Image (cartoon, rainbow, N blue to C red):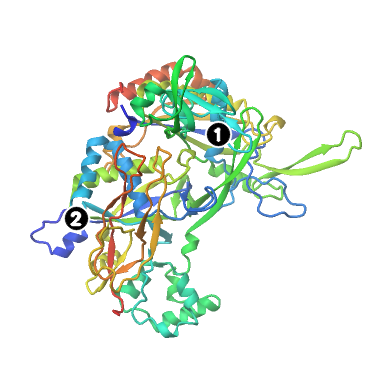
Amino acid sequence: MKFSRIYCQEREVQMSEWRLIKLKFGRTQAHFGEVGIGIEETGERVRSDTLFSAWISAYARLFEKDAVEELLQQFLDSSTPPVRISSTFIYREEGDRTIYYLPRPLQFPINYPKDNDLEFFKTYKKLNYLPLEVWQRWYQGVGFLGTDREELIAETKGKSNGHLCQAGTFDYKKAFKIGQEPKIAVDRITRATNLYHTGFVQFLWEQNSDDINSLSGLYFLLHFSESDRHLEDNLHAALHFLGEEGIGGERSSGAGLFTIEWFQLDKDESWKNAIAFIGGNHHCLISLFWELPLPDGLLNDASYEILERGGWIAGYQLRRKMVRMFAEGSVFPLPPSGKLADVTPGEYKLHPIYRSGISLSLPIKVNEQ
Amino acid sequence: MPASLTQKHLLGKFRLTSTLNVETGLHIGGGGENLDIGGLDKPIIRDPLTQYPYLPGSSIKGKLRSILERLLNKPLNRGGGSGTYRYESDDLADGYTEIDGLDIPYEGARTCQISRIFGSTGGSKFWLKTAVAAEELDEKDNPKKIIKGEEYIQIKRGRNAPARLIVRDCHLFKDSAEQLKRVDTGLYMTEWKFENGIDRVTAAANPRQVERVPAGSKFQFELIYTVEDANQAVEDLQNIAIALAILEDDALGGHGSRGYGKIKFDKLELFYRNLTQYQQVTSTTIKAASLQSIQSFADTAALLDNFGSLSNEIQQNLLSGKGSTDE
């Protein structure tokens, strides 16, 4: 769909530059390493910096050196990167509807009974991800209701059956299973074995005659700073290719393979409203965020969580420099922008290595302190 | 040319699909979580969602690798923990691994038929020709020694070579799953087999139970080979084909010498997609860029018999794709 810029309202033009992409893993398991014993730990989703790195690497393999350097330069040079990428989050299909989970902002929703929440705080605290519908109502709509309170109390005591439950608020963990698979190394002569375990996440699927249907998986949002058909096609091709290579660990043993579905966001009413929300006074991160120095006033009245992001350089047994980044769900009074962090370790001289701290955020409304 | 200043070449991808037939009971162990009295001693691995048995890609890939290492007569230069040794390139270039006081020669992953297919992680404290190290790596002041009349330098960390081969997890065909659901063994979709050890003097018995995927089950098998060097592609695919044929005369999973794990591949089909097709994949053309079937074979014997004509076809596909064949 191509809008003519002149006749269109500013907001609608912006809307058309948002994309939602589903990663469908089918029956494939995935390993997204987390800190733990060996490779036993796995997360259920991929964060924006990892996705960015994997995607750009696939881009480099598909379009080769000059094209990828040109693209990276655009991220490095300008204060408005050509595209912003969110972290991936869980989606779950239930009948005709799709529940999209978003990180719960780290500030209380409007009307949240702060001094009177002992009866349900334990349940509330566990809700790290909210279905889009609830997220929107709490942070962009009427806020926290008396009925929410009643339902959270009911859920704390046993099982609730209200609107929060029907929206899938308490079912985040039903969308995937995390398990461990035993693996062995076998000696080539004596057949002696060394046993270890690898953690895997499996998303829901169903069999439709001979096709495998993904009932849950990961999704993320893309925001282009301006319409760029060429860049979008190339990114699409690179992501498709990445799906055949796999994302995360244990790729060559068949883990992390996916297919993609690429949507325009303006087709979905609730997403459209969530993005175009005007009455916000804060911004909630849906990606990681890093910038140095931080813009003035960013941390006034902010709530945030900080993650350490380290890891290895693909192809070399060297660790990247560790950076601390703001996590998804962090809330700032200004829209965060973010930069690529140079994480090239001292021993590595061949080319710079970046980690994406470029952020994507959504406007929300919270009580001003 | 330092390997990291340009991308690893990509020409396209081959995909081989097949039906993996289980011909004798097959056991790929899963971790038993609980110990029940009268329960299984050795359960098999299952899908966490459906509890269907499946064959992990890593098991098959590991087996193919060990078969090829043996076929190509590779030395054992890499410790895998708990006294397990196998072969793996320490670097992209040739050199020597120093292990248990021995200097074991390895072939660099750029040319090594094993490491370039299955991947290798760089070794530590191995020996590389000083001349090669000076050109490709930034290590000059490390210890040096003479091996077979040439000067070698000790390298702290070698370079990795990512695998060109992806072996996917094998899942049951739908019909096969339906059939297995109806087996009446007391276990879901599997059988138990009793194994017994008997004392040679007292005839005391030591029975144990092993869970197996029953003979007759059919799994969907798929592997993907990334073409990075047109000159090596035919050789790599041939090695993979030979390894598949040997695997049929070997065993997959545990207790192979006792008859477990005989498998057979049939309905083999080869597909290819080149770089240009990948570059043009967008929302509108995704169907047009679908995989193109090259040839199909009834079984591995037919695949090996006709490998000559297949390799011609592969060469043609490589030439018609984007990118020159010479690197």
Q: Amino acid at mark 2?
A: Thr
User: Which of the two residues, A223 or A316, is positioned nearer the viewer here?
Assistant: A316
**Label 1 Cα neighbours within 10 Å, binned few <14 / some 14-19 / many ≥20:** some
- Looking at the rendering, which quadrant does residue A268 occupy? bottom left
The residue shown at (41%, 19%) is: B311
The chain containing the residue under callout 1 comes to: B
Q: Which residue is mark 1?
A: B62
Instruction: Please give the label number shown on residue A76.
Output: none
Q: Which residue is mark 2?
A: A80
**Label 2 Cα neighbours within 10 Å, binned few <14 / some 14-19 / many ≥20:** some
CA distance separating discs 2 and 1: 46 Å
Q: Secondary structure at mark 1?
A: helix
Q: Amino acid at mark 1?
A: Gly
Position of the N terminus of chain B, as image quadrant, is top left
Q: Position of residue B187 (x, y in %)?
A: 69, 49
Up/down of B319 relative to A165, above or below = above
The residue shown at (50%, 17%) is: B305
The residue shown at (17%, 63%) is: A12
